[in-house]
Image: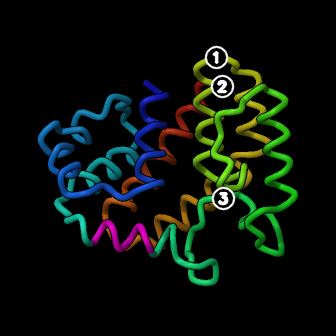
Amino acid sequence: MKQLAIDVFISFIQNPPNQSLLNQIKENKLWQDWFLKNENPLQIEALKLLSSNEDEALIGSDFVSLFISDIEYTKAPPFASFYLDKDKEIYSSNSNKIKDIFLNHRFCDFLENEPSDSLVNELLFIKELINTKNNKALKDFLEKEFFTWFYLWSKDLLNGSKSNFYKGLSMLMEDFFQELEKNL
């Protein structure tokens, strides 16, 4: 189920949901019946925000301003380099370091058209480590690489979002990783 949650996160970081998908999510009560329920107030608030009725245009506009705008106007770019490198370079020594970690673990299913340290690539790697039950590598990667920037990114996403959808998504992701960290 953790892998499915990561797939949901990746999906909405790569593309905003269209109205048809929003209708399906509402019909199937995805957020009300979230499959990794806990009593964390962060998750409860996130699911409430995600369940609000927002249209495709607002969410799509928010997606563009959060993830697509040119770097000077991007509020929360989904790659670690922006947060870790003083020069705010997209492809940096951090990207190369993360790529080396991927290759050392024989993980080759990352998106080469994005920096290795993009959130999507790091989520794909985390998903792979969960799938292979490599908890030692997962814990090491989360502590030494992912958490060095993820919570800052999540706060930026929360604060920069205009839509409840992306506010809720950032909170749900934060809750997911807090729970994952607790259970390692």
Q: What SS does tag 3 mark?
A: loop
Q: Residues within 10 Å of mark 2 (few under 14, many from 20)?
A: many
Residue 12 in picture, x, y percent from top left: 41, 52
Residue at 53% of width from left, 34% of height from top? Answer: 179
Residue at 15% of width from left, 49% of height from top? Answer: 23
Real-space Cα distance between discs 1 and 3? 24 Å
The answer to whether residue 32 is left or right of residue 153 is left
Q: Toward the viewer: 95 or 53?
A: 95
The answer to whether residue 133 is left or right of residue 145 is left
The answer to whether residue 23 is left or right of residue 50 is left
Which of the 4 image quadrants contains residue 177? top right
Q: What SS does tag 2 mark?
A: helix
Residue that numbered label 2 is attached to: 129
Real-space Cα distance between discs 3 and 2? 19 Å
What segment carries the magenta color? 58-64
Q: Toward the viewer: 167 or 40?
A: 167
Asked whether 61 falls inside the magenta stretch, the response is: yes
Q: Residues within 10 Å of mark 1 (few under 14, many from 20)?
A: few
Farthest-out residue, left? 27
Q: What SS does tag 1 mark?
A: loop
Q: Which quadrant, please, contains the C terminus?
A: top right
**Can you say whether 16 is above or below 101 in the image?**
below
Q: Which quadrant, please, contains the N terminus?
A: top left
Residue at 48% of width from left, 43% of height from top? Answer: 175
Residue that numbered label 1 is attached to: 132
Specify which label sits upstream in the sequence, 1 or 3: 3
Residue 8 in picture, x, y percent from top left: 40, 41
Which of the 4 image quadrants contains residue 25? top left
Residue 17 in picture, x, y percent from top left: 30, 55
Query: What label sits on residue 79 in the rendered view?
Result: 3
Given the image, on which type of amino acid does mark 3 rest?
A: Phe
